[in-house]
């Protein structure tokens, strides 16, 4: 039986790369993409990193650098990024019999069963993704998923490797682990890395050589899996089929502070509709609807208020109308006057597969509403998100987030295609 071999394919500065595909003038320029509400920097080009711009920093804190160095700033266009991700993941999935889509810009593949030269395979896959989508990727190959992450990190940092690093049959893995900061090890978060550094464990090699009993006490069973994988023993399998999600939450900060119920109801209607659309797209139904609202906890000059409410439905559903009606009832229950609201959200929980619940639905309007939802989803898919909305959403949205520098949905709306 052959040893396990995993590859991690990671898109380089994914959001920025998506923007560059449709605007090549951005190549070799410092570019950043922002989080929701144009708050923090969540994607940086290599040129932006070289200017000292850190991941997650609020935009206002680096405003001087942005202006001085003419950094190009984009609001996140999640519709575009999701579609580009789908294209990349389709190429990856077609190249390997076993694929785990780990995030919007990362995927693991298992190569053990393929009689191939792993590095040649990786270079070819990298070229195919670049040619078909325009997205550059880095690929790390190793005997465990954790080591594949380490290899990927080196592939990104070392330009001489041309985006591919293989630790399979590599004789001096400890040398690479010694150069890998403990905080960069998969499964070691910021808080845990601080604790480890305080105990003198500041790189992956030192972590690997810790005793099992000490690691179990410091990092629990998951930490033990991490160091076992750093030792080259695979114990974190590929997850080809993700577990059915237990909940679905849509939440946003408002573009400006809201004080009246009508504006908040408009926002909650949108959140509820989008959450319902999401669970329908995954063939799920919700048993419970929850809504929360809150003011700004960091504004010390204004009174703070936070509250939420939930209602269990008479039967699981993914019908937008039912979910919106329930959400608005809950919003009225928790809303209080004389507060400046900053954020709200809708949580759908108790999710189950729609096939498990349809036999129990005897309400006369179920099939009618189900057909209506399918028609709405089809139109929004074809003509773009939010083409069809609920009437209560259609007023000018005072709540909507800042997206002052958002690009077009080049790949999902026919009227937004680039003209040549």
Image (cartoon, rainbow, N blue to C red):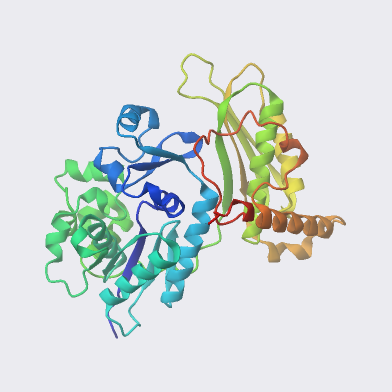
Establish if 161 lies above or below 251: below
Using residue 180 as the reference point, say whether residue 124 is left or right of it: right
Rendering coords of residue 159 (x, y %): 21, 58
Residue 339 visible in the displayed image: yes
Q: Of residues 129 and 368, which is closer to you in this image?
A: 129
What residue is shown at x 75% (from left), y 63% (from top)? Answer: 358
What residue is shown at x 66% (from left), y 37% (from top)? Answer: 268
- Which residue of the protein is positioned furthest toward the right in this rendering? 364
Establish if 247 lies above or below 92: above
Rendering coords of residue 365 (x, y %): 85, 55
Q: Of residues 106 and 363, which is closer to you in this image?
A: 106
Position of the N terminus, as image quadrant, is bottom left
What residue is shown at x 27% (from left), y 63% (from top)? Answer: 163
Residue 209 visible in the displayed image: no
Rendering coords of residue 112 (x, y %): 32, 79
Establish if 59 lies above or below 173: above
Rendering coords of residue 202 (x, y %): 16, 47
């Amino acid at each position: 039986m052959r040893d396990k071999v995993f590859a991690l394919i990671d898109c380089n500065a994914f959001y920025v790369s998506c923007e560059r595909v449709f605007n090549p003038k951005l190549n070799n320029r410092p570019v950043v993409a922002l989080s929701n509400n144009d708050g923090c920097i969540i994607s940086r080009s290599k040129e932006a990193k070289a200017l000292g711009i850190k991941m997650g920093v609020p935009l206002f804190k680096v405003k001087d650098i942005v202006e001085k160095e003419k950094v190009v700033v984009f609001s996140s266009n999640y519709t575009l990024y999701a579609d580009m991700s789908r294209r990349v993941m389709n190429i990856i999935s077609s190249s390997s019999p076993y694929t785990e889509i780990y995030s919007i810009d990362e995927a693991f593949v298992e190569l053990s069963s393929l009689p191939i030269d792993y590095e040649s395979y990786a270079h070819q896959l990298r070229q195919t993704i670049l040619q078909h989508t325009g997205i550059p990727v880095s690929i790390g190959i190793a005997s465990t998923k954790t080591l594949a992450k380490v290899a990927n990190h080196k592939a990104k940092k070392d330009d001489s490797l041309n985006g591919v690093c293989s630790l399979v049959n590599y004789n001096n893995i400890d040398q690479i682990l010694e150069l890998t900061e403990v905080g960069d090890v998969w499964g070691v978060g910021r808080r845990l890395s601080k604790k480890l550094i305080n105990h003198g464990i500041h790189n992956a090699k030192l972590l690997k050589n810790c005793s099992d009993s000490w690691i179990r006490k410091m990092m629990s069973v998951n930490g033990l899996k991490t160091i076992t994988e750093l030792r080259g023993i695979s114990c974190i399998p590929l997850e080809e089929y993700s577990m059915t999600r237990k909940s679905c939450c849509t939440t946003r900060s408002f573009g400006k502070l809201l004080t009246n119920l009508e504006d908040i109801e408009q926002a909650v209607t949108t959140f509820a509709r989008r959450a319902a659309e999401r669970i329908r797209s995954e063939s799920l139904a919700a048993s419970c609807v929850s809504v929360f609202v809150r003011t700004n906890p960091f504004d010390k000059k204004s009174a703070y208020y936070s509250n939420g409410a939930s209602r269990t439905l008479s039967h699981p559903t993914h019908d937008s109308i039912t979910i919106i009606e329930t959400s608005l009832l809950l919003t009225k229950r928790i809303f209080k006057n004389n507060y400046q609201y900053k954020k709200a959200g809708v949580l759908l929980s108790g999710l189950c597969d729609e096939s498990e619940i349809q036999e129990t639905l005897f309400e006369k309007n179920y099939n009618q509403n189900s057909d209506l939802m399918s028609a709405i989803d089809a139109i929004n898919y074809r003509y773009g998100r939010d083409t069809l909305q609920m009437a209560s959403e259609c007023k000018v949205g005072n709540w909507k987030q800042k997206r002052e520098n958002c690009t077009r949905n080049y790949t999902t709306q026919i009227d937004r295609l680039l003209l040549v």
